[in-house]
Amino acid sequence: MSDDKQAGQTPPWIVDLYAEGNEQPPESLDAAVLREAQASIEQGKEINLQPSMLRKPWVGGLASAAVVLLTVTVMFVGSPDPDSLMPRVETLPSLNQAPLLEDEAAVQVTHEPMPVPQSQLMRRQQMSAEVQVEEKDDAAGRAFAKSSAQENIATASVEPARMRLASADEAALLIKSPTCKPDYRLPAAAKIERVGLVDTTYRLDGQVWRVACIAGAWQLQEEDDASSE
Amino acid sequence: MTQGLESHEAQAASVDATPAAVLSASVSDDQLMARYVAGDMRAFETLYARHKGALYRFFLRQLPQAQAQDTYQETWSKLIASADKYQAKGLFQAYLFKLAHNVLTDQHRKNMRHQSVEVDPETLVDPTPGLTEQISRDEIRQSLHNEIAKLPVNQRTVWLIKQETPLSLADIATLTNTTLEGVKSRLRYANEKLKAGMQRYV
């Protein structure tokens, strides 16, 4: 008797009925997974580059010079000014190659405090300029949002960001806002530090991040431990 | 099994109409993983597009939507984190669903500690019996989802993997940490319960 017969056949009409469901994950999930996969690639490139060179000093003067040149380039590109340490705002490739909506172009944020490759320098500089403008709006937006939140705590009528809890004592990875779309999904390993009406902080790899929905776009900023509540 | 493979190929082909995507439809999962480990993001995108639906539905049929999405993401995170350790043996989907099964098991344990419901009650629909001709296909499918949700966890898991993947019963036994006979038994009981629960629509 075949395995399937022993296991009992599922009627074909039930198989077909089930297959018609075909639910797919939401865009926020797709974006979060692809973001993480991309970050893993870029982390892997940096890990593979330096140790292998350092372990092989016998490669020769040319290789040593290449390492020095690369290191200088990396240091220059990744100069520790506030903008370069800010996570860059970028658009992620859509799976079906459709152009991203305007809102989506603003919400895809990656955790990339490490220096970026030379080929992406121009785009990073452009994004840096956009982040500077958003920083100014952010301060004003925070003040406005905070005052509004204090005035409307009972009704939460001004609620730029709202954390949805998966269970009573465990925060979800998804941040929802009526004005920022798609929903912002934290990396799977992130730990929620604080939940607020207007912003939320979380910790990832020892770094605390603050997420807020300001002027229709997700804003992500690094925070010092001393300043996080 | 053939139907499942065709579904995966069709899904991969639908991702993009460019020649690169057409070529990627003939590339195996193992090859895509190897390319991703080598730094090819497009390989991961193709791999993701092939399997995201099956994996998502595996969780969606067993957890409330919020938890299903979180565990779905966590599974991919684990895959990404262990990509360089993946051994190409032609069993990528078994590997993926092994990770998924472990994440699901952990989530069930958490839910038991917090006494959370397994499936969102709002998704349960009870169509009026005896009025088959007036009930839409969507409602019948929702009834099937309800019946699936009522299955014991072990039976439901095995049944869903059987529906969503082309994996053999032996592979399913391995990834669910049970025996071949155990899988057959769970499938048999699951099928019996589903047939009984859907009898009114026959």
Image (cartoon, grey):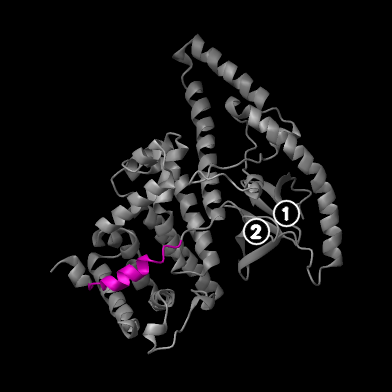
* Quadrant of the snapshot with the C terminus of chain A: bottom right
Do tags 1 and 2 sit on the same chain?
yes
Give the extent of the magenta segment.
A8-23
Amino acid carrying mark 1 in the image:
Cys
Q: Which mark is residue A213?
A: 1
Mark 1 chain: A
Q: CA distance from mark 1 to mark 2?
A: 9 Å
Earlier residue among tags 1 and 2: 2
Residue A47 image point, x, y percent:
52, 32
Which of A152 and A21 lies nearest the eye of the viewer? A21
Q: Residue at x 37, y 44 (%)?
A: B86
Tell me if mark 2 has few (under 14), some (14-19) or many (20+) residues whose alpha carbon lies within 10 angstroms of its own: many
Q: Is residue A73 visible?
A: yes
Q: Residue at x 52, y 40 (%)?
A: A38
* Quadrant of the snapshot with the N terminus of chain A: bottom left
Residue A50 image point, x, y percent:
53, 26
Along the horizontal axis of the image, is A96 left or right of B35?
A: right
**Is B8 one of the magenta-colored residues?**
no
Name which quarter of the figure residue A89 lies in. Answer: top right
Residue at the limit of the structure toward the top, as seen here = A61
Mark 2 chain: A
Q: Is residue B167 visible?
A: no
Secondary structure beneath disc 1? strand
Amino acid carrying mark 2 in the image:
Ile
Contact between marks 1 and 2 (CB within 8 A): the answer is yes
- B97, above or below B33, in the image: below
Q: Which mark is residue B51?
A: none
Along the horizontal axis of the image, is A79 left or right of A23?
A: right
Q: Which mark is residue A175?
A: 2
- A8, above or below B28, in the image: below
Residue B71 image point, x, y percent:
50, 60
